[in-house]
Structure formats: structure tokens, C-alpha cells
Image: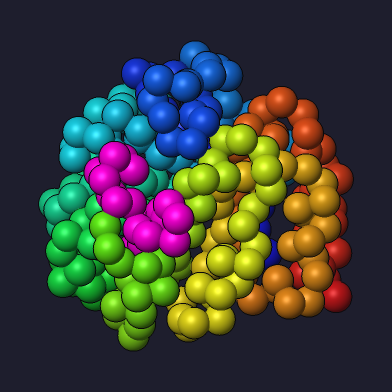
Amino acid sequence: MILFPAIDLKDGQCVRLKLGDMEQATVFNDNPAAQAKSFEDQGFEYLHVVDLNGAFAGRSVNGEAVQAILDAVDFPVQLGGGIRSIAHVEDWLGRGLSRVILGTVAVRDPALVREAARLFPGRVAVGIDARGGKVAVEGWAETSELSAIELGKRFEGAGVAAIIYTDIDRDGVLKGINWLSTLELAKAVSIPVIASGGLASMDDIRTMTEPEYQILEGAISGRALYDGRIDPSEALALLKQVRAA
């Protein structure tokens, strides 16, 4: 059970959005590498990074900031946003990323995702972002007709390392994670699932420690970490107890 701190990059800065709206961005740090190092120093084990501009553009936009993060830290980093080809995957993994996250391309070209997972075993994750139960793509600007479970099942047996499941209706608004939908997906597929979107308080961390939620690989936290609603040392200690049990 891993708690992933999140760095969302917009115009080279570390921001948080509300409901995926680029116009509702709060800047929390103008030095993403320093923020990443701070998370590492606090004891986190794995960093989640999203290139928000890249997700809309369909290509890497905040590459310099991502590279600065990779140069600054030793713990593993996963990146999503604008990675749409095998060449993109290979390039980023070659630069030191531990894992790439494929979102839009998982809907548009699932064969590419399967090929990437075959070429780079254990290093390709799928990002499933849902609004009203339907998968959204292109930086959440478009909604498909696919359900999260339908999309997740496309990659069974493909070697995908994890699914990052985000409920867009909860993202950045501190309403708490949509545990019901997250667990429903986790039970429907054999791929490990990471919860994302809305983690709001230590109550969510305590929920993660309950037996039925331990099928998850972990959860991603953004705004609640930045504004102090979650105490890193307390949260990490709680999750460590679960692993030791």
C-alpha cells in the first residue's frame, strides 16, 4: 500500500486543478524539483507526476521540469500526460522514469499499450480517468462511451503494471476518494489499481488500512498534502503498520 504524492505540472510550475479545469489552477510551488525532493525527504517512496499541458497537447510540454525532478531525486517516479507513442515511452524510460502512464492512447490505440507493456514489462501503467462513470480523454476535455471497467478489462493479461483510476468529479475538491467505484474496478480486474482524485484527510488514509481496501496498490494525494490536511509522517506510519501486519 503506497501513498503517492502528486506533482501536476502546468507551465513549468507545480499546481493543483479543480475538476480537471486548467483555468482553475492553484500554484503551490514554482520549483517542481525542489517539491519532489521535499516529498522524498519526508519519507515518501514513489512520486506521481502529470504533465498537464502535455495531456492537452498530446506531446511532452513540461519535459524540462520532469527532467529536473528526475535529476533531483532517487526514489521512483511515474509520469503521465502526453505520452502517445512507443517512441515517447522509450524516451522517458531511458531518461530514468520508473513507469509511464498511458491514458488517452489506452482508449484510442489499446494495441499500442499492449505492445509497450510487452516491450517494457512492469514499467507501463494505464491511466483511467472517469467522469460520471465514463472514461475521459485528451486531458479530460472529451468523454468516451467506455466505462472504466470495460477499459480496464482490455488490458488483462497484457503485462500492464497498474491502473491509476481517477474520479474527475472529485479531483482537487477534497471530497474524499470515490472508494465504491475504485473497489468495483479493482475487483473486476487482476491488474493492481491505484486510487486517485479527492483524497481529502487522514480519514481516507485510515480507510486505506481497512482489510477490503488492501487489494489496492495505493492512492495518490495532491491538494490535501499541499495544504496540510494530511500529515505525511502520520500517514506513512499508518500504512507501514498495515504492511508489517
Check residue 187 for magenta coloring.
no
Q: Going 47% across and 21% down the picture, which residue do you hit?
A: 25
Foreground of the two, 203 or 30: 203
Instruction: Using the rendered image of the protein, determine whether residue 192 is visible from the camera's viewpoint.
Output: no
* Residue 9: x %, y % from top left: 41, 28
Quadrant location, the N terminus: bottom right
Q: Give the range drawn in magenta.
A: 120-143
* Residue 146: x %, y % from top left: 30, 66
Q: Going 56% across and 66% down the picture, which residue do you hit?
A: 181
Foreground of the two, 221 or 17: 17
Q: Is residue 209 above or below residue 61?
A: below
Q: How many marks?
A: 0
Q: Is residue 33 left or right of residue 157?
A: right
Q: Is residue 153 left or right of residue 192?
A: left
To which quarter of the image does residue 219 belong?
Answer: bottom right
Instruction: Using the rendered image of the protein, determine whether residue 212 is visible from the camera's viewpoint.
Output: yes
* Residue 7: x %, y % from top left: 51, 34
* Residue 16: x %, y % from top left: 52, 28
Check residue 123 for magenta coloring.
yes
Foreground of the two, 46 or 188: 188
Q: Going 48% across and 46% down the picture, which residue do you hit?
A: 168
Q: Is residue 44 left or right of residue 77?
A: right
Q: Going 52% across and 31% down the picture, which residue do you hit?
A: 18
Quadrant location, the C terminus: bottom right
Q: Is residue 2 above or below residue 173?
A: below
The structure's colour scheme is rainbow
Q: Is residue 66 above or below residue 144?
A: above
Query: Which residue is the extreme one toward the top?
Result: 30
